Amino acid sequence: MASVPGLVTPDPQTSVDGASSSESNSDRVPRHVAVIMDGNRRWARERGVPEAQGHAAGVDALRPMVERAQQRGVEVLSVYAFSRENWARASQEVELLLSLLDAAIRDYTPDLVRQGVAVRLLGRMSELRGPTRESIEDALVRTSGGTKMILNVAFNYSGRSEIVDAVQRCIRDGVEPDAVDEATIEARLYTADMPEVDLLIRTGGDQRISNFLLWQAAYAELYFCDRFWPDFEPDTFDAALAAYAQRSRRFGR
């Protein structure tokens, strides 16, 4: 797939560990990394602290990971912040998650602007209301000029809903049934014009993708980590990249 428009790609002679290498950097570092940030509540329970503290620690863990991803030359980082299924949780927990996200976006946006990171939303923005939507819209506008990396925040997101939305767009656009193919649908996904997911990381020990980027991760390398998300440090991210670099991607060949 073509390079992401507007992104400045890293030096192709720089390897994962920063050393010079004759191997292309794009062959070693995944262009698009997706992360299912799981385990906040279990992290809190293990420590005997309120679950709210676990969610707060999860928010804090994101910033250094974004910085490390940019340093390593990742072009697109997609994080699963809030699924459409999460609305079924207790209302008090949902309100907490929304308030934490709102505060994090407001606090982190200036840094993202300075770092040249463009924020994109993956999800049904039309269903959002109130301060959270205002914070997201503000971040989208203020970071729109970023050229160093794209940070996709999957919020009010569902992989199946994304595919449904893409098909509905095909219908609204008047695409004839016989003209619908993979490219037609892909052009109408939330991630249109972005590379497919190369590496999908899930923390917390579970080994499933939980309706996240179903289309984009069709050929992704999967990396499951037992650490809960608040304990997922930059060095842990480096270990995932190192594991990816050792794999042979054959795409059915």
Image: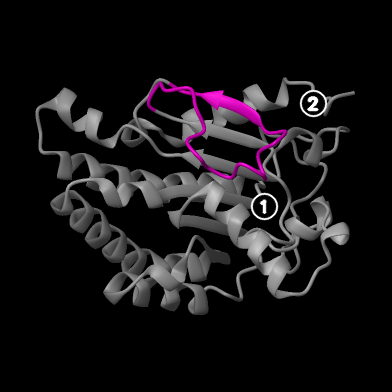
Q: Is residue 44 above or below residue 74?
A: above
Q: Residues within 10 Å of mark 1 (few under 14, many from 20)?
A: many
Q: Secondary structure at mark 2?
A: loop
Residue at 80% x, 51% y is 182
CA gap, disc 1 and disc 2: 19 Å
Residue 115 shown in magenta: no
Specify whether 77 is left or right of 42.
Answer: right
Q: Amino acid at mark 2?
A: Arg
Mark 2 crowd level (few <14, some 14–19, many ≥20, 10 Å Cα): some
Circle 2 sits on which residue?
Answer: 249
State which quadrant residue 104 falls in: bottom left
Residue 83 visible in the picture: no
In what quadrant of the picture does the C terminus appear?
A: top right
Magenta segment: 204-225
Residue 10 in sight: yes
For this view, does 41 lie left or right of residue 149? Answer: left
